[in-house]
Amino acid sequence: MKVTGYAYPWDVLEDGFAARARDLGVDEVAVALSYHSARAATPWSPSTTAVVARHAAFYRPVADGWGTLRPSTPDWVSSSDSGGDAVRLLNEAGIPAAAWIVLTHHSQLGYEHPDVVVRNCFGEAYPWALCPSQPAVREYAAKVTAEAVAGLELASVILEACGPLGAVHQHQHEKTDGVWAPAVARLLSICCCDACAASWDVDADTVRAQLVEEVRRLIATGDLGVTADGLPPSLTSMLLRSRQKSVDELRAAVLATLPEGIRIVLHGALDPWVTGALPGLTPSAPDDVDAVVLFGWVPATGAEAVAAAREALPERVAIASYITAVAAAPVPDIAAYVGELAKAGAVELHLYHLGLAGPGRWGDLGTATAAAHEN
């Protein structure tokens, strides 16, 4: 199994990172070049305990030529090209580098431009979620991707949030965890903005009203199911087609900016209704990419997801599983878990996270990497 380890630019630029990554034995390091807000622990740093990235930022130079949406520069790093500096450092150390690019997850732009974000059937805006149906969002995603890879020697481009985000999100002091049943969360994740509604073949106000009615019914009855069986199947099919069309257009705009021959890796999920960092794959997505990364942070379901993907996706598409070594509850036997993923059909292991995993968790990364290379 090929192993890709994820890291932030400041992680890579910290003294000793390249040596640790080389000793770990990862085949590639994915560097965040466009990333959302975060408070990221820095357990390897001798002078800090965390980097506070107050807002989403672009870790390459922000030049002229942007459209309506222009990313912010990070003042918590010293270089105007910390992402590029990190990639070049890896290249010089003989370690292949990947561009890790987050696309539609951008709270600052969402607050500044509420007209381009996802809106639910109640008309509520999700500022963290740029809507793929919006032309300005597709233009922004294409520009971010083009500028992220410009002038860099890269082994892969890894696309995160290449699709819609929805109601379930780690927001400021989140107080919705566990409140919405899966069916309610899915309905509240359907974008009803004007750009999305323009693609519907029925009256937009009628659709919004039907969604609101079904949400209220599910909440009132305490239904904890996964699907909203109170909606006509024809309506849900139409809404899914509309979403997938916008996602395909977003991905096409992004891929059109990349140099020919570069390896394309897409974070995604088999369930077409999933929103978030690993959004649901559209039927045409496998035709456009070399590998699909599936969420594998939950050992109880990781291998099952890989097996389902291996059956559903073309053989030419590599299946990768994304696992974490920094969860509050460590995987009891991470080597055995990696073996299960390989047996299910995963040929790549994506490791989170080479900067966040300090000395206390580094052993898990090493065990996982070794197990991957043995399978």
Image (spheres, rainbow, N blue to C red):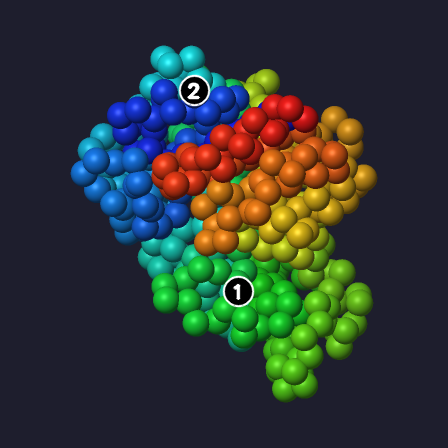
Across and down, in percent, residue 14 comes to: 28, 29
Is 201 drawn above or below residue 246 in the view shown? below
Tell which residue pokes out farthest to the bottom in this image: 220
In the image, what residue occupies the spot 30% across and 24% down?
Answer: 16
Which numbered dot is residue 167?
A: 1
Q: Quadrant of the N terminus?
A: top right
In the image, what residue occupies the spot 60% across and 68% down?
Answer: 185
Nearest to the eye among marks 1 and 2: give it.
2
> For the residue marked with disc 2, what is the amino acid?
Arg
Q: Secondary structure at mark 2?
A: helix
In terms of depth relative to the viewer, which is nearer, 116 or 343? 343
Across and down, in percent, residue 94 comes to: 42, 13
In the image, what residue occupies the spot 21% across and 42% down?
Answer: 48
Give the image quarter of residue 358.
top left
Distance from the alpha carbon under mark 1 to that under mark 2: 39 Å
Q: Quadrant of the C terminus?
A: top right
- Look at the image and tell me whether residue 194 can be seen: no
Is 124 drawn above or below residue 244 in the view shown? below
- Look at the image and tell me whether residue 160 can be seen: yes
Q: Report whether 68 appears left or right of 229.
A: left
In terms of depth relative to the viewer, which is nearer, 227 or 3? 3
Callouts 1 and 2 close, C-beta under 8 Å: no
> For the residue marked with disc 1, what is the amino acid?
Ala
Which numbered dot is residue 22?
A: 2
Is 192 drawn above or below residue 99 in the view shown? below
Q: Secondary structure at mark 1?
A: loop
Across and down, in percent, residue 367 comes to: 53, 32
Across and down, in percent, residue 210 comes to: 67, 77
**Disc count in the image?**
2
Label 1: how many residues lie within 10 Å, few (<14), some (14-19) or many (20+)?
A: many
In the image, what residue occupies the spot 29% across and 27% down?
Answer: 13
Which numbered dot is residue 249?
A: none
